[in-house]
Amino acid sequence: MKNHPKLKFLKVSLALCALAGGLASSAVAATPASGGPDPIEVSELTAAKRAWCDALLLISRTHREGGDAAAVAAKVIDSAYNYGQAPVLFKPTLTFGEQTFRTTREGALAYFVGGNPAFPSDKGFALNPWVAADFTIAATYVEGPIGITMGHVTLTNAEGAKTTVEKTFVFRRGDDGNFRIVLHKSALPFKPASS
């Protein structure tokens, strides 16, 4: 029973949710599966997307309240992304030129909280005064320990203005049982020119 897939996901999900709620300092490692990682379930993709939204709101709230948003963002990246094991295919919303793609932890952290002279265009996307993050899922695809979700995330700031972005996440369950992002692509929706 201790190697049951739902119990393993629950451990990882609780760790991410606790982190998003500011209650934990590190992720809880799941019990390794014998014979490789367990398959991902669609419900896990939904929970992981919610945890990502909650973590973004935590970084923003920590910044507004004068806390160490960079430390919180670093914990989120270390818990939710696969940088500790391999490069992550991360294309943030507002990146361009030679720094469009953030395949390193340093590049991801700079995007979320800014303050890194190696990434001078980054102002800290997560430092915006976000107070709500809602999402829709257009489709999911699961094959073994890989799960993909695509849809919109709508962020609301303190003045009530909404920003909608298109998001594609690919999650992978590692041999350690943990569930991490290996690809994150984000873009603003296309708006055709009016004729």
Image (cartoon, rainbow, N blue to C red):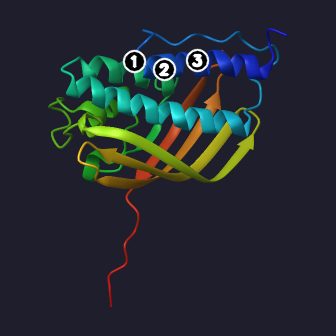
In terms of depth relative to the viewer, which is nearer, 178 or 83?
178
Which residue is disc 1 drawn over? 75
Amino acid of disc 3? Leu
In this rendering, the label closer to the viewer, 2 or 3: 3
Amino acid of disc 2? Ser
Q: Position of residue 131 (x, y in %)?
A: 33, 38
In terms of depth relative to the viewer, which is nearer, 98 or 22?
22
Q: Mark 2 and 1 residues: CB-CB less than 8 Å, in contact?
A: yes
Dot 1 crowding, Cα within 10 Å, few <14, some 14–19, many 20+: many
Q: Earlier in the sequence, mark 3 or mark 1?
A: 3
Residue 101 position (above or below residue 178) = below
User: Which of the image's four quarters has the C terminus?
Assistant: bottom left
Dot 2 crowding, Cα within 10 Å, few <14, some 14–19, many 20+: many
Q: Which mark is residue 41?
A: none
Q: Mark 3 and 1 residues: CB-CB less than 8 Å, in contact?
A: no
Q: Is residue 17 left or right of residue 41?
A: left
User: Which of the image's four quarters has the N terminus?
Assistant: top right
- Element type at marker 1? helix
Which residue is disc 3 drawn over? 14
Dot 3 crowding, Cα within 10 Å, few <14, some 14–19, many 20+: some
Q: Position of residue 29 (x, y in %)?
A: 60, 10
Q: Position of residue 116 (x, y in %)?
A: 18, 29
- Element type at marker 2? helix
Q: CA distance from mark 2 to mark 3?
A: 11 Å
Which residue is disc 2 drawn over? 79
